[in-house]
Amino acid sequence: MTYEYEAKSEKEAIEMAAAELGLERDQFDVEILETQKNGIFKKGFVKIRVHTVDTIHSHSDSEFDGAMPKNTKLFADPVPKDEFEAKLIDFVKTMIDKMGYDVKVDIMFREDKKVGLRLVSSHSPILIGRKGKNLDALQLLANVYAGRLGHEETRIILDSENYRIRREESLVRLAYNTADKVRTSRSSILLEPMNPFERRLIHTTLNDISDVETKSEGDGLYKQVRVIYKGSR
């Protein structure tokens, strides 16, 4: 189920949602729909959409398969439905076990040509890594293995502790905050290196803001996004 709330700040909106739904904060996911800062003639507010544990909402992306699927059951049948899924789970678990970390791997979701695996571990922060780089590396290896099993067209998504969702929410906030800063300074800001999906999220978030533009800089997989005030030229 999804619900929408509006308050003076994101924190207040989340607290309102938790109180009305009778849920703990870790029992629902939050999507920022709209933010409005205090102005001379307008009061600031934050509007959020709350997704309870049966559904999630996220961005889809064709450039980098790190996104969670849109409107997919969060708790899909965790048992592998065929030999491919069983081998995939065994590969990921064995790989992480050999790294020296305990982990439980099960099916998180199934989509057309896409399978999500959930990693449950007491060492989740290590498996995720800084800015999700360890999780991305494990995901890359899982996709290589899927290709060797004859499933090159199937993309494998790895997640742990709902990192992918939390990362997207954080990047959307970063995009809007950075846009505000470059407007104030009438200059540009270069963001941290990001993978293709994360960069695309920044670009699309700010695409409709008329006085701000974005461009990617650098080489390799992890490039940086520069947010530019158009009048700075």
Image: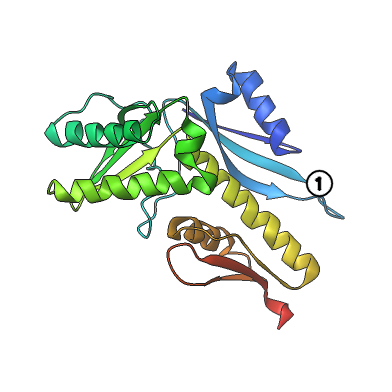
Residue at (37% x, 36% y) in the render: 99
Residue 184 x %, y %: 80, 66
**Amino acid at pointer 1:** Lys
The answer to whether residue 161 shows anywhere in this view is: no
Nearest the eye: 32 or 162: 162
Work out which residue is located at the far top of the displayed protein and give it: 22
Q: Residue at x 15, y 37 (%)?
A: 84
Front in this rendered view, residue 37 or 154: 154
Question: What count of labels does the image hold?
Answer: 1
Q: Relative to residue 7, is residue 210 drawn left or right?
A: left
Identify the residue position indicated by label 1 in the image. Answer: 43
Give the x, y percent position of residue 162. 47, 34
Q: Quadrant of residue 98?
A: top left
Which residue is rendered at x = 68% and y = 48% of the image?
A: 35
| Residue 76 place in picture, x, y as percent | 31, 27
* Residue 62: % across, % down: 35, 58
Q: Is residue 12 above or below residue 180?
A: above
- In this rendering, would 217 be left or right of 120? right
**67 above or below 233?**
above
Relative placement, left or right, of 25 versus 165 is: right
Front residue of 169/46: it is: 169
Task: Name which quarter of the figure residue 185 lies in.
Answer: bottom right
